[in-house]
Amino acid sequence: MTHTAKFTTEDKPSGTVYYPADRLAVELAGVAGCRAIPEERMPYIRSLGRTLGFQITLLNGEPLPPKPIPHPRPRLDVEA
């Protein structure tokens, strides 16, 4: 039997925030040190899930969407 941690998401101006939706997800949020897990901490939770052998999904059972590809930042070449 595979254990599943379920999260709900909310899009905020600072990025996507994941809220725990079951007991296992609450414990993972405790490992992350917060009640709501910001997107930048989710790679650590995902790797922990792979290591311990459980799945991380959304509340409806769909797997988490892949991490979005960051937009390239403009390169500022400043000559003195």
Image: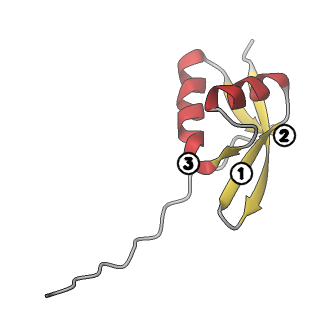
Looking at the rendered structure, the secondary structure element under dot 2 is loop
The outermost residue toward the bottom is 80
* Mark closest to the chain's N terminus, 2 or 3: 3
User: How packed is label 1: few (under 14 Cα within 10 Å), some, or many (20 or more)?
Assistant: some
Rendering coords of residue 16 (x, y %): 69, 56
Q: Label 2: which residue?
A: 59
* Mark closest to the chain's N terminus, 1 or 2: 1
Rendering coords of residue 59 (x, y %): 84, 40
**Which amino acid does the dot numbered 3 rest on?**
Glu
From mark 2 to mark 3, how far is it between C-alphas? 20 Å
Which quarter of the rendering shows the C terminus?
Answer: bottom left
Is 12 above or below relative to 45? Answer: below
Quarter of the rendering containing residue 2 = top right
Rendering coords of residue 39 (x, y %): 61, 49
* Mark closest to the chain's N terminus, 1 or 3: 1
Quarter of the rendering containing residue 57 = top right
User: How packed is label 2: few (under 14 Cα within 10 Å), some, or many (20 or more)?
Assistant: some
Tell me whether circle 1 and circle 2 mark residues in contact (CB < 8 Å).
Answer: no
Which quarter of the rendering shows the N terminus?
Answer: top right
From mark 1 to mark 3, how far is it between C-alphas? 9 Å
**Which amino acid does the dot numbered 2 rest on?**
Leu
**Which amino acid does the dot numbered 1 rest on?**
Val
Closer to the camera in the image, 69 or 61? 69
Q: Label 3: which residue?
A: 40
Is 45 above or below relative to 54? Answer: below
Q: Label 1: which residue?
A: 17
User: How packed is label 3: few (under 14 Cα within 10 Å), some, or many (20 or more)?
Assistant: few
